[in-house]
C-alpha cells in the first residue's frame, strides 16, 4: 500500500518546474519577489502531494501543519485540489474533500474551496458533479480558483487576449451570467503573480481589459497582494491610488484575504501592511467586516447570488464618495 501511495503521488502531482516564473514566462520584479512567488507555488504542490499520497484524508494534516505560516494556506489550497482530483477519478472514492474539511482544513475553508476550483480546471466536465462545495455562498470561490488556474496556465489567452467565459455551466442552478465575474476575480488574483507583484505592471494589465471587468480584476489583485504579499507599503499605496474609482474593490479583496488569514490564525507582517494600506485597519478589523457581511447576507435572495451581496456589503464599508477610507 505504501508503494501504491507513493506511485499515486508521483503520477498525480504536477512537476514543481511548473511554478517557476521563468517557465511560466511571468515578470520578475526582483529576486525577493520571484522567490516568494515560487515558494507559494512549491507550497501549493507540497500540499497537493500530501493529499495525493494520504492513506486517510486527515493524514495530510501532519505535513500541512509543518509548512511555514506565510505559505501554509497555499499548501491547504493545494491539498484541497489534490483531494478534489481524487474525488473526480473513477476509482478511490468521492468523499475526500468532504472528509478533509471536517479537520483542520475547516479553518482554511476559503482556500480549500479555491483549491477545488483548480481541480475543476483539470477534470472533464462530466466529472464536475463530484466537486464538493456545498455552502451556497462560498461555493462561488470554486470559480475564483478556476479563474486563477486558467490565467496562471493559459496566460496569453486569459490575461493578454482578455478571454472571458460565457454562460459558464457551473453551478448548475446559476445564474450562468454571474460566473464570469467570479472567474474574473480569480484572473485578477493570478495577475498579481503574472505581473511578479509589480504594482505598476499589474495595474497596466488590468487597465487594458474592458472597463466593465476592472472592478472584479482589482478585487482579485487586492486579495492576492494582501494574502500572498510581495510588495512594500509604498508600492501598495501606489496601487491603491492608481485603482481610482476601484479603490473600494481593492479593499474588498483585501478584506477577503484578511478573513482567510485570521480564520486560519496565519496573519503575518505583510498582511498587516496591506490591510492598513488598502482598508485603513488591521487584519482583525478587516476580517470582522468580512465576517459580519457574510452573516448579514447568508440566506438573502435578490437579483444577485449571496456571494455578490456579500462582496457588495464589504465594498460598501470602504466606499466614501467613491473612495476608500
Image (cartoon, grey):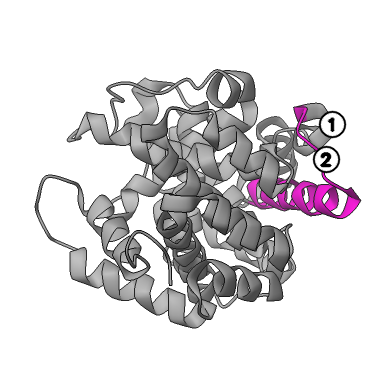
Q: Which of 294 and 83 is in front in this view?
A: 294
Residue 248: image x %, image y %?
41, 59
Work out whether residue 215 can be spotted.
yes
Query: Disc 1 or 2, which lies upstream in sequence?
Result: 1
Where on the picture, by quarter, is residue 11?
Answer: top right
Q: Name the side, left or right, on which 324 lies relative to 42.
A: left
Q: Which residue is drawn at 20% across and 48% down?
A: 305
Which residue is denoted by mark 1 in the rendering? Answer: 22
Residue 323: image x %, image y %?
40, 62
Q: Is residue 238 above or below residue 168?
A: below
Q: How far apart are marks 1 and 2 (CA)?
A: 8 Å
> Any magenta on residue 32?
yes
Q: Give the range drawn in magenta.
A: 24-50
Residue 50: image x %, image y %?
67, 52
Mark 1 touches mark 2? (CB < 8 Å): yes
Residue 91's tag is: none
Q: In this view, does 256 lie above or below 125?
A: below
Q: Name the side, left or right, on which 290 lies relative to 161.
A: left
Q: Which residue is drawn at 28% across and 67% down?
A: 294
Q: Is residue 12 above or below residue 77?
A: above
Residue 138: image x %, image y %?
33, 54
Q: In which quarter of the image is the N terminus?
A: top right
Tag 2: Cα neighbours inside 10 Å, few (<14), some, or many (≥20)?
A: some
> Any magenta on residue 175?
no
Our reading of the magenta stretch's main secondary structure is helix
Residue 28's tag is: 2
Work out whether residue 228 can be spotted.
no
Q: Which of 324 and 11 is in front in this view?
A: 324
Q: Residue at x 60, y 22 (%)?
A: 160
Q: Residue at x 17, y 35 (%)?
A: 173
**Mark 1 secondary-structure assignment:** helix
Amino acid at each position: 500500500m505504501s508503494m501504491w501511495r507513493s506511485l499515486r503521488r508521483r503520477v498525480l502531482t504536477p512537476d514543481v518546474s511548473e511554478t517557476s516564473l521563468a517557465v511560466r514566462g511571468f515578470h520578475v520584479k526582483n529576486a525577493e519577489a520571484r522567490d516568494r512567488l515560487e515558494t507559494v507555488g512549491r507550497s501549493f504542490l507540497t500540499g497537493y502531494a500530501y493529499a495525493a499520497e494520504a492513506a486517510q484524508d486527515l493524514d495530510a494534516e501532519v505535513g500541512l501543519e509543518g509548512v511555514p505560516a506565510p505559505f501554509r494556506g497555499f499548501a491547504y489550497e493545494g491539498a484541497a485540489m489534490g483531494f478534489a482530483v481524487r474525488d473526480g477519478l473513477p476509482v478511490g472514492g468521492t468523499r475526500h474533500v468532504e472528509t478533509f474539511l471536517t479537520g483542520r482544513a475547516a479553518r482554511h475553508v476559503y482556500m480549500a474551496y479555491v483549491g477545488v476550483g483548480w481541480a475543476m480546471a483539470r477534470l472533464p466536465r462530466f466529472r464536475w458533479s463530484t466537486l464538493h462545495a456545498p455552502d451556497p455562498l462560498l461555493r462561488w470561490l470554486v470559480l475564483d480558483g478556476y479563474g486563477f488556474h486558467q490565467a496562471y496556465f493559459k496566460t496569453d489567452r486569459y490575461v493578454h487576449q482578455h478571454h472571458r467565459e460565457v454562460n459558464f455551466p457551473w453551478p448548475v442552478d446559476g445564474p450562468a451570467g454571474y460566473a464570469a465575474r467570479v472567474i474574473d476575480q480569480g484572473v485578477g488574483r493570478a495577475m498579481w503573480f503574472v505581473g511578479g507583484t509589480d504594482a505598476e505592471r499589474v495595474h497596466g494589465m488590468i487597465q487594458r481589459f474592458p472597463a466593465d471587468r476592472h472592478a472584479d480584476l482589482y478585487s482579485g489583485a487586492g486579495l492576492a497582494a494582501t494574502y500572498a504579499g510581495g510588495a512594500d507599503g509604498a508600492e501598495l499605496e501606489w496601487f491603491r491610488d492608481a485603482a481610482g474609482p476601484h479603490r473600494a474593490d481593492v479593499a474588498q479583496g483585501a478584506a477577503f484575504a484578511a478573513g482567510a488569514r485570521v480564520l486560519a490564525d496565519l496573519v503575518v507582517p505583510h498582511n498587516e501592511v496591506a490591510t492598513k494600506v488598502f482598508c485603513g485597519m488591521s487584519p482583525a478589523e478587516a476580517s470582522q467586516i468580512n465576517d459580519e457581511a457574510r452573516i448579514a447576507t447568508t440566506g438573502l435572495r435578490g437579483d444577485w447570488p449571496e456571494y455578490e451581496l456579500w462582496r457588495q456589503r464589504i465594498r460598501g464599508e470602504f466606499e466614501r464618495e467613491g473612495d476608500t477610507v
